[in-house]
Image (spheres, helix red, strand yellow):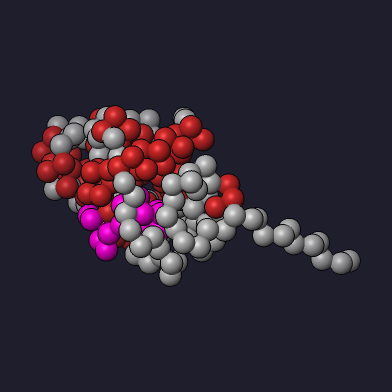
Amino acid sequence: MTDAPATASRAMSKAAAKAFITALAEANPNAESELVFRNPFELLVSVVLSAQATDKSVNKATKGLFEEAPDPASMAALGEDGIARHIRTIGLWRAKAHNVALLCEQLLERHGGQVPSDRASLEALAGVGRKTANVVMNVAFGADTMAVDTHIFRIGNRTGLAPGKTVRQVEDGLVARIPKDMLRPAHHWLILHGRYVCKARAPECWRCPATKWCLYPDKRMQAPPARKAAAT
């Protein structure tokens, strides 16, 4: 994962981290996943498909997929080629179709068609790594987990909230600094903040409710001038 050249040179204190997260919560109190799903199975499939793809593109692909195959049995019957037919518009669709087909067979064979709630069982499924397991445990089962995607990795380092060279270091830093009762929803506050405000190439610091606690050295506190309309 890469980020802008400048990042925080030190980590926030726990008190600052709590204030930072609280500010994000107050600005976006009803934050939730932007993936469209109706149950843990649809969430699991959507998160597997979301690797290197936008939530918008995944939602577009899964609308028809879930209509045709709403459960592991029907999706396993649809098979790799049938799944691929629905998801060709998203990145890595061939590998994802293979993984989702195998994942559905594993759910049927190992878990009676139900999505397991524990990390070990989730990570043993095809296409499921630690981040995907964290999302499913957090969103579907209410676990206090922190799934670190590109946005959260960037925020952790850029702001000093949880600096780390690896995804796991950032995850562990966030779990250590964010109050336990805020950890589960913080997953959504941070992802959406990184997606829409603390952007990779041009962070919109002038819109950020948490700049007071952010340690990023190159804050942009003024919006760029609006582009003039081209002359006709």
Which of the image's four quarters has the C terminus?
bottom right
Determine whether 36 is above or below 93 in the image: above
28 relative to 225 in the view: left or right: left
Give the magenta part as a residue range: 153-169
Name the foreground residue: 120 vs 191. 191
Q: Residue at x 67, y 60 (%)?
A: 224
Determine whether 154 is above or below 133 in the image: below
* Horizontal and vertical percent position of residue 209: 52, 42
Q: Residue at x 44, y 47 (%)?
A: 213
Q: Residue furthest right?
A: 232
Q: Is residue 168 magenta?
A: yes
* Horizontal and vertical percent position of residue 103: 21, 46
62 relative to 39 in the view: left or right: right
Q: Is residue 8 magenta?
A: no
97 relative to 199 in the view: left or right: left
* Horizontal and vertical percent position of residue 164: 27, 59
Q: Quadrant of residue 7?
A: bottom left
Determine whether 176 is above or below 165 in the image: above
Tell me if I can see residue 195 in this picture: no
Q: Residue at x 46, y 37 (%)?
A: 23
Tell me if I can see residue 168 in this picture: yes
Q: Residue furthest bottom?
A: 5
